[in-house]
Image (spheres, rainbow, N blue to C red):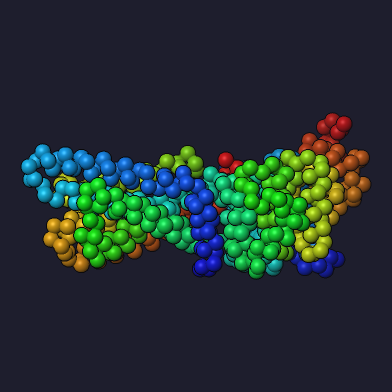
Amino acid sequence: MNLRIVHALLLRYVFLYTRSPVRMVEMVFWPIVDLLVWGFLTMFLQQNTSGAFPHFITFLLGAMILWDILFRAQQGVAISFLEDVWTRNLLNIFVAPVRTLEYLCATFAVGVLRICVTAVALVVIGWLAYSFNVFVMRWWLIPFFLNLMLFGWSLGMISTALILRWGQAAESLAWAVPFFIQPVVAVFYPVSVLPGWLQPVALALPATHIFEGMRQVMQTGTMSWVPLAWAFVLNLVYLALAGGFFVWILNYTRRRGLLTKFSTQ
Amino acid sequence: MADPDTRETLLEAVELTREFDGVKALDRFSFKLRRGEVLGLLGANGAGKTTAMHCLLGLTLPSSGQLYAFGQPLHSHRIAILRRSNFSSSYASLPGNLKVWQNLLVFARIYGVAQPKQKIAGLLELLEVSHLSDRLTGQLSAGESTRVNLCKAFLNDPELLMLDEPTASLDPDIADKVRKVVRRLQRERNIGILYTSHNMIDIEEVCDRVIFLHKGRIVAEGSPADIVKRSTEQSLENVFIKIARSGDLENTNGKEPTP
């Protein structure tokens, strides 16, 4: 892998985002709207349940912020690819000496940048509006962050592969794919709430272990390293599978001549 | 028989066939492109030019046959080959939401161009588009956009260049300028160029040799003047029409003669 090429591809997205205030606003607008809606809703529930659920607000706001890390990492990959489709630049990229891994790494890096922007905005607003301190999770935040980012990259590769296969008609998958798994990975409620048959499915997804861990850390201040290790191992498996799926679909589109359609649509 | 042309072969297709749902878009297509040669790929819409170009760029895999560039198989040396090549098409634009210099800088870095800013400035000046450097690429006219695309195509001093209809939708003045710049750079740098166009003025002015494709097969090959001489037609344009209608250079297969 050539880091110069990754840097060059990343530079393109940096130019794109820094010259377009609308794109910067888009990155923080919906997360902030979500934070405000969930924050006020939980305050209302807390006031009307006489404090029966003391961790309501921290659970929900923490979950919302961590979910956004996963979502932004996925979007970094999928939307970066779509930017190339929308600007009819994909042909230029695929006939340049860019390896698939270099292209993907650049989109991963875009995901990291998007996470940084939205996370800072959410942490600051969470603190100002609800006195919610995300750092109550202390050093556990680092493995949470890393694992959710890795899973976001996997989902991003899967979303992009599906768009490659089915064309621009499937571009809404860039936003939809993370929400397919959201009900199962126990973002806002514990795994125990899920029906028994669905719980093994939930535990087979790395994000589930992170959201469960987050609630444990918020309640007790600590957690076992075992779920984190599970999440990490599962992430490695999903990254390998998603990467393999992406390469397989890319080769399939080359065999079928579908890749060139993106330059003429 | 030994090949009389001793120049290095930059690009070679051997019995290249590409089928789409049982229909052959390319049928046992073979050719060689030499260093310093401009080879025109001609044919009516659907003749197989674009499929050939996409196979040569590695965007579409052939159903059978082999492709070599710089003596190496394309499928196993794709990245090394692409470093020494470049491509420009009037149908593949650079991102319209970036400024011209930003787009060119990104590609200069991808190709590892030394002193990219000086290189970009030199190419913009050569193609008479220096004043567009700070403009958004999406705001350029077709002629301006084509010349910026050509700047990108010459960024890495390619030895092998593929130009897909570089003068499509250009007015005659700009098309003439583009042809002259391409020809000049090609001669100065001894580049091998594969050139597609529907504009026969382009072809006669730029190409040393042409290949006519019809239904994926080569139906005529030679210098533009030689092909006109071998036919009963008066111009390359009429040869093009004749081949498009009859699929043959030598006779019209009972079809009406070209006007």
Q: Nearer the viewer, residue A182 or B194?
A: A182
Q: Is residue A143 left or right of residue A191?
A: right
Position of the C terminus of chain A, as image quadrant, is top right
Identify the residue shown where x is 78% and y is 40%.
Answer: B171
Q: Nearer the viewer, residue A86 or A164?
A: A86
In the image, residue A77 lies at what x, y percent?
44, 53
Quadrant in the picture for residue B57? bottom right
Identify the residue shown where x is 86% and y is 38%.
Answer: B238
Identify the residue shown where x is 69% and y is 64%.
Answer: B118
Whether residue B213 is visible to the viewer of this picture, yes or no, is no
Q: Nearer the viewer, residue A158 or A178?
A: A178
Identify the residue shown where x is 92% and y is 47%.
Answer: B229
Q: Residue furthest front?
A: A128
Whether residue B196 is visible to the viewer of this picture, yes or no, is yes
In the image, residue A13 lies at what x, y percent?
50, 54
Q: Is residue B145 left or right of residue A131?
A: right
Q: Is residue B80 left or right of residue A164?
A: right
Quadrant in the picture for residue B31? bottom right
In the image, residue B235 lies at what x, y percent?
89, 41
Q: Is residue B33 above or below residue A91?
A: below
In the image, residue A103 lies at what x, y percent?
50, 59
